[in-house]
Image (tube, rainbow, N blue to C red):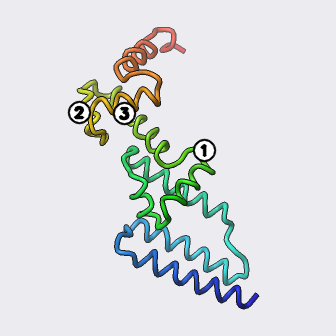
Amino acid sequence: VQELRFALRRNLARSFTNRLCHPSSSVQGRVWFCKVFAEDLNALFLGRFANPETDKQLIIRYITSKIAQSHGCLRASEVARLTGYSERYLHQLCSQSLGLSLKPLARIFRINEACARLKRNRGSLTALAVELGYHDQAHFIHEFKTVCGTTPTMYLRNASEFYNEFSKLTL
């Protein structure tokens, strides 16, 4: 038991040094890691381990908040850099917890932002595609249709009919 605790302390210290001192770590990632590290140390010194499900939930919450803040424009490599975990681990974690890996999750946030912007401003689809990080309008329309089942133009046409019906406005 003593050998196991010593090995855990050594691994925690190595993990702390590697993640906190890595030059590509962001300030938010470092703060988040310090919080998780402090919880792990607390659990270690109390003779028990932190609940791994709680740790995973914290990671998922952090990932989804970062992807939402970026409107789905955050790449998996950037999420890995922010958290200090590998892309592969994060993909597996998201798949297990949410049923989606990082890329489809970001795609949903990105298309959700596109829908919101389409409703607010009926500008150029090309400009919207560029703002949301798509290479061109065709790529944007293809992804929009894959997620929503319709093109952005048809989405706008049908959405406006749905919301402008008198009976729905009076309910």
Q: Under tag 2, what secondary structure?
A: helix
Residue at horizontal 60 percent and vertical 44 percent from the top: 99
Q: Is the N terminus in the top left, top right, bottom left or bottom right quadrant?
A: bottom right
Q: CA distance from mark 3 to mark 2?
A: 11 Å
Which is more foreground, mark 1 or mark 2?
1
Question: Which residue is the extreme one toward the right?
Answer: 1
| Residue placed most toward the observer, 135 or 132 | 135
- Residue 51 lies in what quarter of the image? bottom right
**Tags 1 and 2 touching, CB below 8 Å:** no
Q: Which disc number belongs to residue 127?
A: 2
The answer to whether residue 45 is left or right of residue 87 is right
Secondary structure at badge 3 equals helix
Q: Nearer the viewer, residue 56 or 39?
A: 56
Whether residue 84 is situated above or below residue 162 in the rendered picture: below
Dot label at residue 133: none
Which numbered disc, 1 or 3, marks the residue that appears first in the sequence?
1
Q: Which residue is disc 3 drawn over?
A: 114
Q: Earlier in the sequence, mark 3 or mark 2?
A: 3
In what quadrant of the picture does the C terminus appear? top right
